[in-house]
Amino acid sequence: MNRLIFTIRLVISVLFFTLGTALCMAQRTIRVPADVSTIQGAIDQARTGDTVEVSPGVYNENLDFKGKGITVRTGAKSFEDAASTVINGTQDGPVVAFQTGESASSILNGFTIQNGHASVASSARRWHFVNNASPTITNNFHFQELRLRRVRRQSGKSLNPRK
């Protein structure tokens, strides 16, 4: 009888531990600006597997994914939809940086990206900088100096925009 009670307690303990772990590790959706006022603030709060969902508008900031395997997205399903959500860089470096070993699970989707800055000697593009990383960048417009470039799905590849 004691052995049966021990076994039941053990099974219940394992179930509660598993459920608790699953709840703690559940993926979250952080909404900008409803939950956090800036995209970078949401990235800072995000954990691996989380989604940062950005509402249409203009966001005056530069972003750094900081090595996180997260999705930063709008509701854009096409390049045309990306026009409603703008990341307007501060012209103080690239608008979006992937420089801490981000993998294909670091996703940027559905933005118009503009007003970045890169020196002539820099390997950074004005709109994004990728160094020792292979993020997934999809459905984004890059607008700079009256040129509009589209970036099609690129994951783990050279990030040269296709026209």
Image (tube, rainbow, N blue to C red):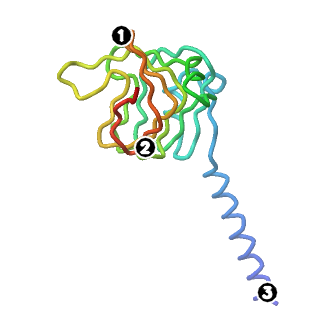
> Which residue was labeled with disc 1?
145
Question: Along the polypeptide, which appears first: circle 2 or circle 1?
Answer: 1
Disc 2 to disc 3, C-alpha distance: 53 Å
In this view, the residue in front, 65 or 76, is: 76
Q: Is residue 69 above or below residue 59?
A: below
Left or right side of 95 for 54: right
Return the residue at label 2.
155
- Is 105 left, or right, of 17 in this rendering? left
Question: Which residue has dot 3 on it?
Answer: 4
For the N terminus, the image quarter is bottom right
Spatial CA span between label 1 and label 3: 74 Å
Most distant residue in the left direction? 121
Q: Is residue 61 left or right of residue 33?
A: left
Type of amino acid under label 1: Glu
The percent coordinates of residue 163 (x first, y second) are 40, 26
Picture coordinates of residue 32, whole percent (x, y) = 61, 25
Look at the numbered disc 1 and give the secondary structure of its residue. Answer: loop
Three-letter residue code for mark 2: Ser
Which residue is at a point 42% across and 41% down the rendered structure image?
Answer: 135
Q: Nearer the viewer, residue 156 or 163?
A: 163
**Left or right: where 15 falls relative to 110:** right
Residue located at (55% from left, 46% from top): 49
Q: Earlier in the sequence, mark 1 or mark 3?
A: 3
> Which one is closest to the eye, mark 1 or mark 3?
1
Residue shown at 55%/28% (left/top)? 110
Above/below status of 9 relative to 20 = below
Sequence-first tag of 2 and 3: 3
CA neighbours of label 3 inside 10 A, class few (<14), some (14 to 19), many (20+): few
Residue 76 quadrant: top right
